[in-house]
Amino acid sequence: MAADRGVGFGSRGARAAGGPAHYREAVTRPRTLTDDLRDRSDEELAELLAQRPDLTAPVPGDLAALAARAASHASTVRALDGLDQRVLTVLEAVTLLPAPASVTALAELLGAPAATVSSAVDRLRRIALLWGSDDDLQLPAVIRDLARFPAGLGPPVADALLGVGAGRLAPLLAAWGLPAEPDPLRGLARVAAYLADPGALRDLLVELPADERQVLDALNSGVPVGLLNGAAGPIRLDPRDPPARRLLGRGLLVGRPDDTVVLPREVGLALRGGRPFPDLDLSPPEPGTEPVRARSVGSTAGGAATRFVALVGQLLEAWGDQPPPELRSGGLGVRELRRTAALLDLTEPEVALVLETAYAAGLLAPGSDPEAGWLPTPAYDRWRAGAPAQRWVVLAEAWLTMPRLPGLVGSRDDRDRPFPALSRDLDRPAAPTLRAAVLRLLGEVPTGRRATPTGVAALLSWRAPRGAGPERDLAVGSMLTEAEELGLTGLGALAEPGRLLAAGDPAAAAVALRPLLPAPLDHVLLQADLTAVAPGPLEPELAAALGAVASVESTGGATVYRFTETSVRRGLDAGYSAADISDLLRTRSRTPVPQPLSYLVEDVARRHGRIRVGTASAYLRCDDEALLAEVLASRRTTALRLRRLAPTVLAAVAATPQVLAVLRAAGFAPVQESLEGEVVLTRPARRRAADRAAPPRRGLPPAPRPELLRAAVRALRAGDRASAAVRRPVPAGALPRTGSSATLTTLRAAARDGRPVWIGYVNAQGSASSRVIQPTSVEGGYVVGYDSRHEQTRTFALHRITGVAEIDADPDEAGQAGEPEVTSALDG
């Protein structure tokens, strides 16, 4: 059943009362969904709630309320979204049959095996979209209402012509050689009976000219409604008229007052040979698969996971130093996205995936100050301290559950505007459900083979046809690429860590990933071109030290670091000495330290700190008068308004931080000194956004746990008994009165047997009321029970309960005894 046909579900009929009247009514009216739910076992009710978890939020008060919620539009749409093409087709066929339908009639209409149809009907029964026996299938009226054009067919001719006068029916009867009928209702019945005759309809279609048949085929292959000016005008059969108007005269189209024509269902079925789905195939498509080396899947996935974790760390470290600005409308600008892609040596879609995953994991957020830009959060520091496998699990879980589609970044919306990264425009609530479906499908592929993207898209379209379309096909393709980049898959096949993570076991996924990760390296390879190559992931201490004195030039299978004057000076500013840097290079390199690199470190260290900046507003002090003269003469230091105080001292108008920044930008290597003349070396302060929780994860509610399902079923049964029960005779308006001992005994017995009771209760304000509850525990001076009036579990103090009365579970017996129901029992 396609999404654009609007199939829905609802309830008709009220909750049945009890007693003999209920039996007499059941003989004359169809069974309702409430009746069907009451006849289900506890296990069947629990299965319904498990497969439609939205029905338990919150738990309905009784089974009638459950039936009403299951018949609501929103809940039905969710249930339909989870059905495959086979089940939806069978449900759609039910709407084409008069009520009540049968499995035999469905199989005959579809031309499908009865066993296949029966299996689909059982599935619909389990989730309460159908009920009744195989010969008495009941379909809610709302499905017929919302299925506007089931199978692409129009309404029956009797519905299409409803309200048409005898004057408009007479030309049709005359054209068919039938006697006129002055009564409009009888005329309508005669027209409907004629079109329902396969032989008569076949004769009409055989005699059609080619242009008229072309119009019918066009309406029958798409929406069975077309535009025609004056469609509701007089009916005639003039060969000079356009083909659509001639079809009105033949009775094969029906005109409407809104200048539209509709193709009646009988005509559409006849054009299709009596089958609503002429080329019906209820079997799922075979997913296209290709062979793959099973041993290579894990190693490829492990390498991708290592690379992705490193990319997230590299990105957030860079943004911690130089955060990009946030757009006023939210998100990241196109220029900043391109700059970041160049920094990480990635494509823009790859950068978008890194950004969105880090944001979904709570590692990235906009700063509190509008000018602060995008910054790492304190959660990033905690994440960075974790083990590599655990860091990957955090990122992969965030990707699985985030409601955004990074693959949209770079494409354009309906207004031809590009989708910015980190913006709400990327939100798609169905994204988590679609990712889970993609991984579930990949997990079904046998070991040693991988599914092709086209095969995955085709099978998903069969399993969830209501969401099928070009946008979803593009999203599926992007998700397969993203899963490969994250390391959930390797060579297109689902790796074991990805399989465990998709099954909801992140701890086991981390354990499975550890042996697939390459061992951290304790060395690099220095090269003569002032670069160092890390042929794999480095130990955290080595990576931090190398990052302090060198800049990352490229990433991938190997990371390339480049040493420059700026990077070495950055390390010296952070507190490393020339000896520390030389020792790091000598002890951590498997190749000899190139002489140019040694000269670079020594040269920068020799010049480092020769100029010292203090507070005057600021001053410059240097024993080398020639160097101070060079600083004073440089055009790049003009903004500091320097003046010489002594041969070795210059004064500046600007503050110390600004003086340091300007001198470093001009190519000098100053350091700050304290009032005592000591060198002040400080590591750059880490900039962080405020810590925040990860964005909300959307999608269908998770399936309730078994213990919650059992409790929900008990509450539904109790509420149903309470709503239909007859109370024992108590004076109208009075509260139950029993002694404390009897009250405690009765409540404990009710909790043990799962029976509802009627209690009188006085609250803290002294207001008395009565209510029906089903006790679940009685201990510690309190009673915990399900309050059917307020539809929730509540706690009652024992000393405030005035008394307790049992509820008669057999309405017939009470009714025969002539005991009146106390209507005030639930007024409180």
Image: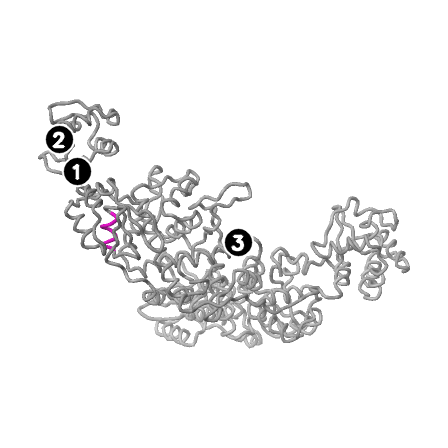
Amino acid type, residue under disc 1 in the picture: His
Residue type at mark 3?
A: Leu
Q: Give the range drawn in magenta.
A: 540-547
Label annotation for residue 622: 2
Q: What's the mark number on residue 474?
A: 3
User: What is the C-alpha distance between the residues marked 3 and 1?
Assistant: 55 Å
Q: Measured from the top left, where is residue 765 in percent x and y?
A: 36, 56
Q: What residue type is labelled 2?
A: Cys
Q: List the residue tagged with mark 1.
A: 608
Give the residue at x 29% y 52%.
533
Q: In the depicted view, which residue is nearer to us: 21 or 91? A: 91
Q: Disc 1 vs disc 2: Cβ atoms closer than 8 Å?
A: no
Colour approach in the figure: one colour
Q: Decide: few, some or many residues near mark 2? Use Cα within 10 Å; few <14, some 14-19, many ≥20.
A: some
Q: Does the magenta stretch include residue 25?
A: no
Is 314 positioned to the left or the right of 351 in the image?
left
Q: Alpha-carbon neighbours of circle 1 within 10 Å: few (<14), some, or many (≥20)?
A: some
Q: Where is residue 425 in the image (x, y as percent from the top left)?
A: 48, 46
* Residue 544 place in picture, x, y as percent: 24, 51
Label 3: how many residues lie within 10 Å, few (<14), some (14-19) or many (20+)? few
Left or right of 770 on screen, residue 609:
left
